[in-house]
Amino acid sequence: PRSAGGAPVAVPALSRSHIRVVRGRSTCRPPSQHSSPPFMANLPLTLPELSPPLPPSWYEAPFVIRSEPASLPSASLDALEHLSSSWRAHAEFYPRGARSAAASALRLAPRRSLRRLRQGDASGAYALLPVPPRRWPQLLAAAGVEEPPFVAEARRRPEEECASAVGHANVSARFERELRWRLLIVGGGPGAGMHLHADHPPASAWHVQLRGRKAWTLCPPNQTRGGGCLEATLGPRDQLFFPRGWRHATATLDAGSASASRLLVTPPDAPLFGAAVQDHCTRGLALSRGSYEVLCAALAPCLRRLMAGQWTQDGLDSQRADSARILA
């Protein structure tokens, strides 16, 4: 390498002792006397790749699961448009994309938002479509994917407390729509995506790429781009998990790139998630008591347990009984 003036720049030599292997991937570690050379200081790192079965503490750090080679085609935009025709919740449609925090969204019917994405002048547009709980398996099946066990086995996570409560009250769809629990995310063309942000309510997230490719940047909580951030590119059926608080930005690499995402409440998430949803209910009841009363009454017992760290499986039956009694 050369400096701006053209003079050669000395690069610290790397001996065999400066190379380590991380999860099967070799990475270079500069010598201690050159711990932060200028040309390496802000380079993002590659996201770790894991293969099932996952370790017990899988939820503590972000990782990628690569798909096995498959002959199945990716989900088509026609299929996604057809599936969304029966969804009722409005989509967030960003005509100019969402790469800026100041981007504004339109509220459109799901099918209409996908049609807008396919127009010639919508190459930078981006759409977030809430997926009804009952339609989620159909969406994944359209791309030939299934939830992995660590996602599908919700009974082993704190969120089952609240899922059971809203199910008994018949407000599961309302609960998930309010919190953007499951989403279909589609970009119009290359370069569409989302600015660097953290999810709210505070929970972990699982993403699976349905078609096309998408580039991800993830930064640890309270950190912006630079050293310590991680990068990955997902192709069809590749999966990504990241814990609560990790800031992330995305950019699609192909026209019509689509992914599905859902929130996960892992053990470390429970107290903060419970407090955030409790605050959501408090504000909702103040604005429109009638529309929030049933939902928030159903959630009250489980939120108290989450905030107190009492979400264990042993208490699930009593929590269900509490919810049924309050709704009776």
Image (tube, rainbow, N blue to C red):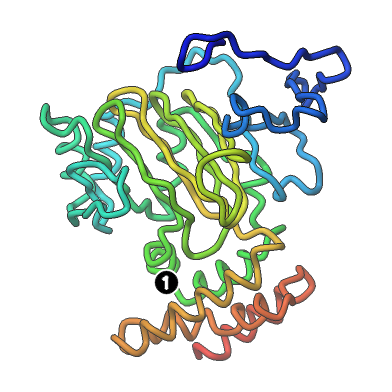
Amino acid at the residue labelled 1: Val
Image-based side of 184 in relation to 327, left or right: left
Residue 258 x/y as whole percent: 36, 33
What residue is shown at x 27% (from left), y 41% (from top)? 126
Using the image as rendered, state which of residue 125 and residue 174 is in the foreground: 125
Quarter residue 194 falls in: top left
Estimate the x, y position of residue 316 in percent, counting from the top left.
Answer: 70, 73
Decide: is 263 above or below 83: below
> Eyeballing the image, is 196 above or below 191?
below
Query: Residue 318, position in %: x, y?
Result: 71, 81
Q: Label 1: few (<14), some or many (≥20) within 10 Å?
A: some
Tell me if 258 is positioned left or right of 68 in this view.
left
User: At numbered mark 1, what does the secondary structure look like: helix, strand or loop?
Assistant: loop
Q: Residue at x 46, y 14 (%)?
A: 5
Image side of residue 139 versus residue 71, left or right? left
Quadrant hosting residue 156 = bottom right
Q: How many marks?
A: 1
Q: Which residue is mark 1?
A: 171
Identify whether 150 is placed above or below 311.
above
Image location (x, y in percent) of residue 46: 62, 28
Which residue is painted at 86% across and 13% down in the image?
Answer: 16
Q: Quadrant of the N terminus?
A: top right
